[in-house]
Image (cartoon, helix red, strand yellow):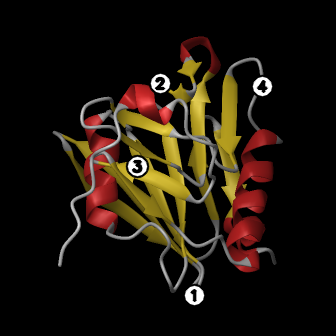
Amino acid sequence: MSTTVKPIAFEESLLLPEDKCEEIVEGVPRHMPPASDDHAGTIERVYLAFSSRLDRRLWKVGAFGSGQLIRREPLTYRIPDVAIYRRRDFRAHHYVLSTPELIIEIVSPANRKGNLQELLRHYAAIGVPEVWFVYLDRKELRRLRLDEGSYQEVERLSAGEIAILGVSVPLNEIWGE
């Protein structure tokens, strides 16, 4: 026998206890297992790489569980591993309302986020110009840019540096080497 789940509305979600391991997609809660130690360590390294290089007066580097609102109806919010916002445009009211300039997702072998194409559709819907997927198992970074409503891969890197937002980050910092 199947059970019908009543979608959670935006206003209802504001009353829910905070859960850093749960996203709501199309009004339905999706529980994610906690990040592995490697995954969490990579999030921290990426966060530190950018927060130590970007001017904090101009940029806000978010990590560690902020909900990025995709849409209110049906309620959809995602929890990017790392998101970088222009500080002057940053707005939040319970969820982050601003569109980040860059989202970085750490992809573990047992991917916590589920379908990556769905995730990209959500990020495209709010106009995130660039998304990176960092694959821990093969030490590879996929760089995708939004082009006419969908993401196109522009490069794959395993070594060297990657430049964005006026800073350059050595990949060995991301890999923890």
Q: Which residue is mark 1?
A: 137
Answer with left or right where residue 79 lies relative to residue 44: left
Position of 98 with respect to 83 (left or right) is: left
58 or 27: nearer the viewer:
27
| Picture quadrant of residue 60 | top right
Amino acid found under the numbered disc labelled 2: Leu
Q: Which residue occupies the foreground of this view, 114 or 74?
A: 74
For marks 4 and 1, the one nearer the N-term is: 4
Which residue is label 2 attached to? 97
Please say if 138 is above or below 10: below
Mark 2 in CB contact with mark 3 (< 8 angstroms): no
Q: Secondary structure at mark 3?
A: strand
Q: Give x and y (percent) for residue 70.
A: 36, 36
Q: Residue at x 59, y 81 (%)?
A: 139
Whole-number angstrom distance, CA of label 3 to CA of label 1:
27 Å
Determine whether, in the image, residue 99 is placed left or right of residue 6.
right
Q: Quadrant of the N terminus?
A: bottom left
Q: Earlier in the sequence, mark 4 or mark 3?
A: 3
Q: CA distance from mark 4 to mark 2?
A: 19 Å
Residue denoted by label 4? 56
Judged by depth in the image, the label closer to the viewer, 4 or 3, is 3
Label at residue 24? 3
Residue 162: x, y in percent? 59, 56
Q: Secondary structure at mark 1?
A: loop
Q: Measured along the vertical axis of the image, is residue 144 above or below residue 159?
A: above
Does label 4 or label 2 sit earlier along the sequence? Answer: 4
* Quadrant of the rendered image containing residue 55: top right
How far separated are the C-alphas under marks 1 and 2?
32 Å
Separation of marks 4 and 1 at Cα, in angstroms: 32 Å
Q: Residue at x 35, y 41 (%)?
A: 8
Q: Are marks 1 and 2 in contact (CB under 8 Å)?
A: no
